């Protein structure tokens, strides 16, 4: 085991010292140089008494690209979109899309993360983010009084960790006294109840320490100098070694759960660890002495969070393991555990095939900045000499104090005529050569980066001297470079970022959360989404800028409306209301407005809220036919009423006749008759008459209703059922069968 530990420590040290990004390497020096150029630091070639101006081409270029990139990714509130695998997954895909963006923007500062991510890549070759599941804890102290044993035990029936800090146990004398009285009453009545235990009257006052765990997805921006990777790696996922190097205080390590005694014995980081890009960044803010800086950091320990492919069980297969170690070379192992994922993602604006690190935009412009700074310095020095010429004087014939004191109206005392003892030495102006050279260097920079004065909004002649077509062509060519970088970012680091977020949600987010989808709060549970979606990154690319897209969308909307009108306002066969709504939604989105429902109602929702459409107006022929039917119905109603009265009269006569027959036969035969069959026959007759009465009533009601409809006819309403052709509208037929 000791041999294995030694092997691991040796492996870690070798990986760290030979990794890309380790101190003193070419990569570290190149990144320092890029930061210095971006910040406009001195070039190191300055001469006292000469111009020391520095051109800001690197900064200008990056700050011109960055807004366009951020607009492409953040113009909408959806950076990522989940594509459903099957039709049944569409509702869940919408939930997943909303929740992914909620985690990125709300749970984490999504805009700031993208800003740092992109800017690091543009300046220092690659940008890095770290995404992981964080089981954070919060500690609360709670005080409870007069708790029963059951209530006290119930405090522990939670997922929180409960620790009793203080506890006071006492007897509830009042409750015990009342129970004794009740017990005595039961005994007097001859009833027995089980005697009470003293614990039944025990109450508790307690103070507890409640530790709540709040698991969430956490995303951090990683400074490039803190990231180390295997020298032979092409991507993060296929690397044998990836590490996050960070300074941590001893108290932070103890809070993370590491042994306090072991942490105390960890060595403080050495002074040379601060010879990094961070020193360059901070130098522009405050020129602090290195000694003071080092002294202030002496209590900090250098920690390496490494992800290493290592054969821990010696089965011949290297497994991915997370190893936390300390020391300048990471030789002190604090944690060694298996893992299934490396929690880092990266982007680069100019990828280099078969190489992990790409090229930065800063690299494209650094030599241009150096040359422009040199030319500008010489030009300024030349202009200074031109305005303040050197003078050749005859020794002893000129008062040198007067000569060296330059002021308007100043006097120079000479012992001879000035033209005889003083001779100006004219400097040769270089502006005729310098300005064309500066213009040429700007052209070279534009060709390399695609960032022109027109794209920056600096060229006042762009709209005056060029045609609209020429301007659009120029802007399109300029945008192509930025859009290529945006597409590279989207298909690499940004997509990888959201895939990792999705995987972490599915794996760890077992609690239901409520998010807003289409202005409706919907509960989501990510554990149900496993292996159900594909992830696609939504960026504002495709048909051009937002302005160009809006012009195209307005043209499409105009033609949709024309087609809808040609269809007579009906939703077939070419355009429906949902098509028009989708176009309007895209226009609103391009305008930078978030909530489409504030301006237009979704037709799917609107149809549910609208009353049924009014029927078309009646034709004159239909009105005549309805009048005829109404008259016929009135005649039938009269006949039905007459039949109804005749049935009622017949029923009364049958009842009287039935009673008379019973009396007659009883008197005649002076015996008890079996009247069952007679009653059955009579009941059958009554039922038939009752059914006929119901039928007559229904027919009368239907006819009356139709009559009212006919009486209320106007030019805009048509009662009843619509029938095609010239067929009249008929009332519903009444079934006379029961």
Image (cartoon, rainbow, N blue to C red):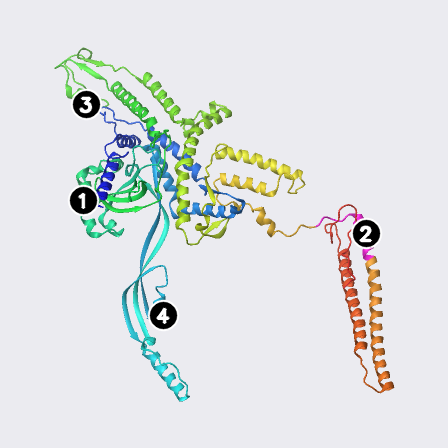
Residue bounds of the magenta highlight = 615-631
Q: CA distance from mark 3 to mark 4?
A: 97 Å
Q: Which residue is mark 4?
A: 150
Measured Cα–Cα span from mark 2 to mark 1: 105 Å
Element under disc 3: loop
Instruction: Give whichever of discs 3 and 2 has the lower sequence position.
Output: 3
Q: Main secondary structure of the magenta part?
A: helix
From the image, tell me which residue sits under label 3: 405
Quarter where residue 149 is shown: bottom left
Instruction: Determine whether label 3 and label 4 are within 8 Å by CB.
Output: no
Q: CA distance from mark 3 to mark 2?
A: 118 Å
- Return the disc, 2 or 1, that comes first in the chain's sequence: 1
User: Which is closer to the viewer, label 2 or label 1?
Assistant: 1
Residue 267, labelled with which disc? Answer: 1
Which residue is outermost to the front?
Answer: 315
The secondary element bearing badge 1 is classed as loop
Residue 625's tag is 2
Residue 283 placement, left or right of 606: left
- Counting residues from the N terminus, which is met first, the one under dot 4 or under dot 1? 4
Q: How busy is the neighbourhood of tag 3: few (under 14 within 10 Å), some, or many (20 plus)?
A: few
Looking at the rendered image, the disc whose residue lies closer to the viewer, 2 or 4, is 4
On the rendered image, what quadrant is the C terminus found in? Answer: bottom right
The residue at the point 44 percent across, 29 percent down is 480
């Amino acid at each position: 085991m000791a041999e294995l530990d030694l092997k691991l420590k040796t492996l870690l040290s070798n990986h760290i010292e030979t990794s890309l990004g380790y101190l003193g390497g070419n990569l570290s020096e190149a990144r320092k140089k890029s930061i210095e150029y971006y910040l406009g630091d001195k070039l190191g070639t300055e001469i006292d008494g000469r111009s020391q101006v520095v051109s800001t081409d690197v900064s200008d270029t990056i700050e011109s690209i960055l807004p366009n990139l951020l607009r492409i990714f953040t113009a909408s509130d959806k950076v990522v979109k989940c594509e459903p695998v099957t039709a049944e997954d569409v509702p869940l895909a919408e939930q997943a899309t909303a929740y992914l963006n909620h985690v990125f923007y709300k749970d984490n500062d999504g805009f700031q993360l993208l800003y740092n991510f992109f800017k690091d890549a543009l300046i220092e070759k690659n940008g890095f983010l770290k995404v992981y599941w964080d089981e954070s804890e919060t500690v609360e102290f709670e005080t409870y009084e007069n708790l029963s044993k059951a209530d006290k035990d119930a405090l522990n029936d939670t997922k929180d960790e409960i620790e009793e800090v203080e506890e006071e146990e006492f007897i509830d004398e009042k409750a015990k006294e009342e129970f004794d009285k009740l017990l005595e009453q039961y005994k007097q009545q001859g009833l027995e109840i089980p005697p009470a235990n003293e614990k039944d009257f025990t109450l508790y006052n307690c103070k507890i320490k409640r530790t709540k765990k709040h698991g969430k997805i956490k995303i951090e921006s990683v400074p490039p100098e803190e990231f180390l990777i295997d020298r032979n790696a092409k991507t993060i996922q296929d690397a044998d070694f990836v590490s996050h190097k960070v300074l941590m205080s001893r108290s932070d390590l103890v809070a993370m759960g590491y042994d306090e005694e072991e942490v105390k014995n960890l060595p403080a980081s050495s002074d040379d660890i601060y010879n990094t890009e961070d020193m360059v960044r901070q130098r522009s803010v405050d020129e602090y002495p290195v000694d003071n800086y080092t002294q202030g950091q002496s209590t900090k320990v250098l920690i390496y969070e490494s992800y290493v492919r290592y054969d821990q069980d010696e089965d011949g297969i290297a497994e991915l393991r997370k190893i936390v170690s300390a020391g300048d070379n990471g030789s002190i192992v604090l944690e060694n555990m298996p893992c299934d994922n490396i929690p880092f993602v990266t982007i680069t604006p100019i990828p280099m095939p078969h190489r992990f690190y790409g090229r930065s935009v800063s690299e494209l412009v650094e030599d241009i900045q150096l040359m422009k700074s040199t030319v500008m310095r010489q030009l300024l020095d030349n202009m200074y000499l031109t305005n303040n010429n050197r003078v050749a004087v005859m020794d002893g014939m000129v008062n040198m104090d007067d000569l060296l004191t330059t002021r308007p109206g100043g006097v120079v005392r000479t012992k001879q005529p000035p033209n005889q003892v003083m001779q100006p030495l004219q400097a040769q102006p270089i502006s005729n050569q310098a300005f064309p050279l500066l213009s040429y260097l700007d052209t070279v920079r534009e060709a390399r980066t695609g960032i022109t004065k027109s794209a920056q909004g600096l060229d006042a002649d762009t709209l005056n001297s060029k045609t609209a077509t020429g301007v659009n062509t120029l802007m399109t060519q300029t945008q192509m470079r930025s859009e290529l970088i945006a597409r590279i970012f989207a298909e690499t680091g940004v997509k990888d970022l959201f895939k990792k977020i999705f995987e972490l949600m599915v794996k760890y987010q077992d609690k239901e959360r409520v998010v807003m989808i289409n202005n409706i709060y919907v509960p989501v549970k990510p554990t149900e989404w496993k292996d159900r979606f594909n992830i696609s990154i939504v960026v504002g690319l495709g048909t051009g800028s937002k302005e160009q897209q809006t012009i195209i969308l307005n043209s499409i909307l105009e033609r949709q409306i024309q087609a809808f009108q040609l269809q007579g306002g009906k939703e077939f066969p070419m355009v429906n209301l949902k098509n028009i709504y989708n176009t309007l939604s895209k226009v609103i989105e391009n305008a930078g407005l978030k909530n489409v429902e504030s301006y237009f109602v979704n037709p799917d929702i609107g149809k549910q809220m609208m009353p049924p459409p009014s029927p078309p107006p009646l034709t004159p022929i239909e009105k005549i036919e309805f009048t005829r039917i109404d008259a016929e119905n009135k005649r039938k109603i009269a006949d039905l009423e007459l039949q109804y009265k005749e049935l009622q009269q017949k029923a009364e006569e049958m009842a009287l006749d039935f009673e008379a027959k019973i009396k007659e036969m009883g008197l005649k035969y002076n015996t008890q008759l079996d009247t069952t069959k007679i009653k059955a026959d009579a009941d059958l007759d009554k039922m038939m008459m009752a059914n006929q009465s119901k039928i007559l009533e229904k027919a009368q009601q239907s006819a009356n209703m139709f009559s009212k409809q006919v009486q209320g006819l106007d030019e805009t309403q048509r009662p009843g059922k619509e029938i095609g052709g010239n067929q009249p509208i008929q009332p519903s037929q009444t079934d006379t069968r029961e």
